Image: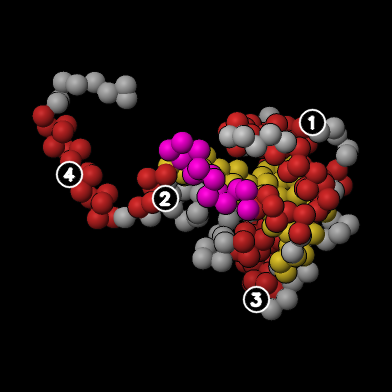
Amino acid sequence: MKYLEEKTLSWANAALSEFCVGDRVINGRLECFSCKKAGQDKKLAKSLELLYQSNNNGNTSVVEQQATPATVHNNVSIGTLADSNTRKLLINLISTMNASFPDYDFSDLKPEQFHKEVDMRTIVNAINTQLAEIVEMDNIGFLEKLWESIVAAIAPGDCEVYSYIPDMDGCSDPFSDGTLWSFNYFFYNKELKKILYFTCMSRSAVHDLNGHDEEEDDDDMVCRSEDDDEDDDVLMEGDWEDGA
């Protein structure tokens, strides 16, 4: 996937980089990629295609059961690996994430970890809700300018939109370790053969500062264990229009 520089998104990437909100830090970025593959991307695509085809051999019954993706709220499954279009789409999404996060390998992701969004207004509202705190921090007009930039970069009204929901129990991606919330949306404009990847996450400022230091974690665990021994009886309370 070739990275495409979009000057209209530069200000948004700057605004979403290390944005402090109280005791939390928001990090996000919007990147455009061409779906044309070359070099390592082409090799990865070929290897994944062969893997998907081999895994489908003998799994006809499973494929038939999953042939009609069920609607879940405002999104649907992207399909099954028996469908060549699903395989191509999955490879594009994986390649995009690999390009955006070169220190991670997303090759093991499965179709069920992605969803096709069916309501643009729901997407806009979800993103706006997560970024509302930025607006509250004296960034009036931020969301309006953000969506104007996205329209200029990818024409969302002409896109299919997909989302990725990470497995928070895992630690194989940048969205699991210490993340309070995250979202990942892929605006796929087939006519332009182009994907805009909008990823954003929030972490505690302490986590970002410490970089998840294992030694500090161990010390903290010891302290908490000692506190628990002393206080066994203490209870802890613990607008966008369709079509564009």
> Disc number at residue 221?
none
1 vs 4, front mark: 1
> Which mark is first along the chain, 2 or 4?
2
Residue 42: x and y in percent read 70, 74
Where's residue 64, x and y in %? 71, 46
Mark 2 and mark 3: Cα distance apart in space: 32 Å
Q: Earlier in the sequence, mark 1 or mark 4?
A: 4
In the image, which disc is placed on residue 208? 2
Looking at the image, can residue 68 be seen? no
Q: Secondary structure at mark 4?
A: helix
Q: Quadrant of residue 50?
A: bottom right
Extreme left residue here?
Answer: 230
Upstream in the sequence, badge 2 or badge 3? 3
Q: Amino acid at mark 4?
A: Val
Q: Residues within 10 Å of mark 3 (few under 14, many from 20)?
A: few
Q: CA distance from mark 1 to mark 2?
A: 33 Å
Q: Quadrant of residue 46?
A: bottom right
Quick one: quadrant of the C terminus?
Answer: top right
Query: Which residue does the numbered mark 1 point to in the structure image?
Result: 239
Q: Decide which of tag 1 and tag 2 comes sooner along the chain.
A: 2
Give the residues drawn in magenta, as a range: 14-27
Of residues 203 and 89, the one drawn nearer to the viewer in this rendering:
203
Q: Is residue 239 above or below residue 179?
A: above
Tell me which residue sits at (43%, 42%) in the image: 204
Mark 4 = which residue? 222
Q: Look at label 3 and name its amino acid.
A: Gln
Q: Position of residue 152 (x, y in %)?
A: 83, 50
Amino acid at the residue labelled 2? Asp
Q: Which residue is mark 3?
A: 40
